[in-house]
Image (tube, coloured by chain):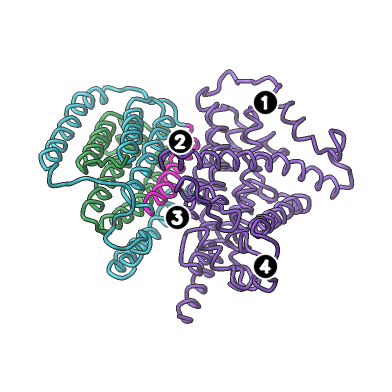
Chain colours: A cyan, B green, C purple
Amino acid sequence: MQLALFLIFGGLAIAGAINLLLQKHPINSALSLVVVMMSLAVLYWSLGAEFLAAAQVIVYSGAIMVLFVFVIMLLNAGEEEHTHGSRAAYIAGFPGAAAIFCVLSFVFLTESKHLGSANLGGQLSQASNNIAEISSVLFTKLLLPFEVTSILILVAILGAVVLARKEQ
Amino acid sequence: MSAQVPIAYYLILAAILFSTGVAAFLIKRNIITIFMSIELMLNAVNLTFVAFAHMWHQVQGQIFVFFVMVVAAAEAAVGLAIIIAIFRSRQTLNVDQINLLKN
Amino acid sequence: MSHLNPFVTFLLLNILKLAVVLVLTLTAVAYTVLLERKVLGRMQNRWGPSRVGPFGLLQPLADGIKLFLKEDLLPFASDRPLFIVAPIIALTCSLVSIAVVPFGALQTITVNGVGVDIFNVANVNIGLLVVLGITSIGVYGIALSGWSSNNKFALLGSLRATSQMISYELALGLSLVGVVLRAGSLNLRDIVASQSAHGAASWNVFGGFQFVAFFIYLMAAYAETNRSPFDLPEAESELVAGYHTEYSSMKFAMFFMAEYANMITVACVATLLFFGGPSSPFGNLIPAFGGPVIQAILPIMWFILKVLCFLLLYIWVRGTMPRFRYDQLMAFGWKVLLPIAMVNILVTSLVLALRG
């Protein structure tokens, strides 16, 4: 079950990511990123992080990506054109990305034995409820970071309003 | 039925997503798509956090992902506002033409 | 049957449940349309559909056949794949969330060693979040339909719909926090159980003092489903037909069904969260009567009755209220509903903390 979920949704995620790279029109790229995020939500759920799976769907695909699609629609962005700058990026981009991938996967494969393996369901220590555990840690030990992020969001809202407003 | 999946596979999946994000970040010329590839990289890192949280049977990794999501939401709001402001003044989304500081 | 292993049994039973619930929901969608036309007709002092079958009861069938047989137009300049996918996204998202709704009392039957809850397709720990998540995905259907039609009215309609739905989603989500605080769980069965002790007196909307939250939820739900008085995305006096201007035949029917299925979902969630779901409004005042079959069917009857009341309220509002102006809509969402929702959370959590 775990393996089947991993293969199906991992495959979907990779296909979505590569589609993001290949598509010319930003709206198609945005939609393939939504596919990546939804399949990651399923993977989170299969790793026992059910709250994060829901948060991923609500926050990432339901709010952030909708904002992206909205901005693309609002600005009526067309297909991207190629400039001489992009040719240099091709030469640097693919080898760089491939190098990063090789280094990361080499490290992960050599350490594979120590990492162990995953099985389906909620396996967090003893608690049966993932959300209860997250909230108890979040609101006791990590209360200060939580409050700081809320202030960050407030600042972000104000900044977005100021930036996007038309100048009189 | 309950075949186990090594944690390393999840990490390699995250590595693939991350390097695709890096490639898209470098190759794409549309500023919105570049912004989206940053989100893809953030998502890849989130997957590693969840996988490690699963491996250590600890909830802290998941909470960190929660914080990353919150920061990503704030970042998207501000970033898209900046993109709208740039488009208003320059009428383009191509990063090669947004070179005001160069000249 | 006994030669099947537990996994296959579980899978087959769940597919059976899904099929039954899906057919029932689609039938309910069809008859909600008829109900709306009938009731709206009576409110406007006319008959409504009355020709097809007795009392016009076969009208949904006739409508379906008519829409199915119409020509399926594809605009020349449309973005073809997105144009086809958009109505599918809209309809799927509106139907999926029915899966987590418990529409009867907990009733487990055991087949072949596998226990199955027959009145709930999926009893998920995070049921409420699933409903919210699916609702937020539904925005894509509308956004993409306007974009891919390549029509200015459709684009304006979908831009309006998207910004309206994002804005009201906040108020919608925050209005539910009070209920979650009281129940201490996101599981819809737990939320229902937390308010079924003393019948109507323990419902969240009365005994839980969540009537402010209920008001916010109701307003936000009208906006989320693009219904009157917030039906600006399809304001026919300004935008032809809004985001589905270019759609015809079955694709239009899918948008239409999605709207009514969303109405039903929203009514189900309101019933579960504020009105005790399938539990009886009399609580334990009336002793259990009849056999186990009647005791199993009675909660479903209560549930359907409550959902029906909500649908009638929807139709009543549509027959009564004029449409808002767009700036009024945005100001109402951000400056009225959102602050009230936050104050409601604050007061609810303070009261709960003080009571221990």
- Residue closest to the eye, C316 or C60: C60
Query: Which label lies toward us, 1 or 4?
Result: 4
C-alpha separation, residue under disc 1 versus residue under disc 3: 37 Å
Residue C43, percent from left and from top: 84, 50
- In space, the residues marked 2 and 1 are separated at their CA atoms by 29 Å
Q: Is residue C103 left or right of residue B66?
A: right
Of the residues shown, which amino acid type is indicated by label 2? Answer: Ile
Chain of the residue on which disc 3 is drawn:
C
Which residue is labeled 4 in the image? C288
Marks 4 and 2, how far apart at CA: 59 Å
Instruction: Mark 2 vs mark 1: tell me if same chain.
Output: no
| Looking at the image, residue C334 lies above or below residue A74 | below
* Residue plotted at (52% across, 50% down): C100
Pointer 2 and pointer 1: residues touching (CB < 8 Å)? no
Residue occupied by mark 3: C126
Tell me if residue A76 comes above or below residue A56 in the rendering: above
The first of marks 3 and 4 along the sequence is 3
Q: Chain of mark 4?
A: C
SS label for mark 3: loop
Amino acid type at circle 3 is Ile
**Can marks 3 and 4 be said to lie on one chain?**
yes
Q: Do marks 3 and 2 share a subunit?
A: no
Task: Name the mark nearer the viewer: 1 or 3.
Answer: 3
Report the residue at 21% width, 24% height from top: A88
- Judge by depth and name the residue closer to the eye, C149 or C22: C22
Which residue ends up furthest to the left in the rendered image?
A: A110
Prevalent SS, magenta region: helix
Mark 3 neighbour density, 10 Å: few (under 14) some (14–19) many (20 or more):
some
**Image point (52%, 59%), residue name:** C189
Residue C197 vs residue C137, the one in the foreground: C197
Kind of element beneath mark 4? loop
Dot 4 alpha-carbon crowd within 10 angstroms: few under 14, some 14 to 19, many 20 or more: few
